[in-house]
Amino acid sequence: MEVSWEKIKELEGKEFNYSFSVNDESFLWSEKEEYKDFHLLSTTALLEEIFRASTEILEPYIPEHVAVVSSAKINHIAPTPYGFKVFMKIKIIYVKGNKIKFSADVYDEIEKIAQAEFKKFIVNKNALKRKNNEKSSKLI
């Protein structure tokens, strides 16, 4: 099944809403052991959730392909404690060929906590696996 490029192009300008709860230790800031005691959502976990949501948007249109992040910028402007719910508004800014630009506005139950922009490229799964295998075999 091929990529539905026309349908992906129709997503341009549309907004999608997602949410998650900071209810697992894997979400917590942990660059240093002592930071875990703050019980705060990490920027890394937040980005992962944003990327996961964007993948859910695209997956129905790219069955034989995968959308890989090529660049990302985030402003994480407020802390979010463990136990809070997080709400994301993800917008597709543009679609140019196999490149898609997204924006995300992120809020917790109290305030805006982050703003992000990122780009993803749509690539064939088999081609990506092949490139990975070729590169991996060079180490052997």
Image (cartoon, helix red, strand yellow):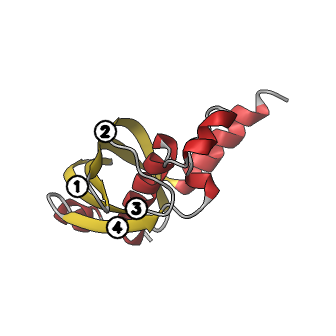
Q: Residues within 10 Å of mark 4 (few under 14, many from 20)?
A: some
Query: Label 2, label 4: how many angstroms apart (C-alpha)?
Result: 19 Å
User: Based on the displayed image, in which of its 4 quarters is residue 99 positioned?
Assistant: top left
Closer to the chain start, of discs 3 and 2, is 3
Q: Percent position (x, y) of residue 41? A: 48, 49
| Quadrant for the C terminus in the image | top right
Closer to the chain start, of discs 4 and 3, is 4
Q: Which residue is located at x 22 percent, y 56 percent?
A: 91
Q: Percent position (x, y) of residue 33? A: 69, 36
Closer to the chain start, of discs 2 and 4, is 4
Closer to the chain start, of discs 1 and 3, is 3
Helix, strand or loop status at disc 1 = strand
* Residue at the disc numbered 4: 18
Residue type of the residue flagged with mark 4 = Tyr
* Residue at the disc numbered 1: 92
- Closer to us: 131 or 105: 105
Asked if marks 4 and 3 touch (Cβ < 8 Å), the reply is yes
Q: Residues within 10 Å of mark 2 (few under 14, many from 20)?
A: few
Q: Residues within 10 Å of mark 1 (few under 14, many from 20)?
A: many
Q: Residues within 10 Å of mark 3 (few under 14, many from 20)?
A: some
In the image, is 35 to the left or to the right of 109?
A: right
- Using the image, tell me which numbered label, if any, was put on residue 56: none
- Closer to us: 23 or 18: 23
User: Based on the displayed image, in which of its 4 quarters is residue 85 positioned?
Assistant: bottom left
Q: Percent position (x, y) of residue 77? A: 31, 39
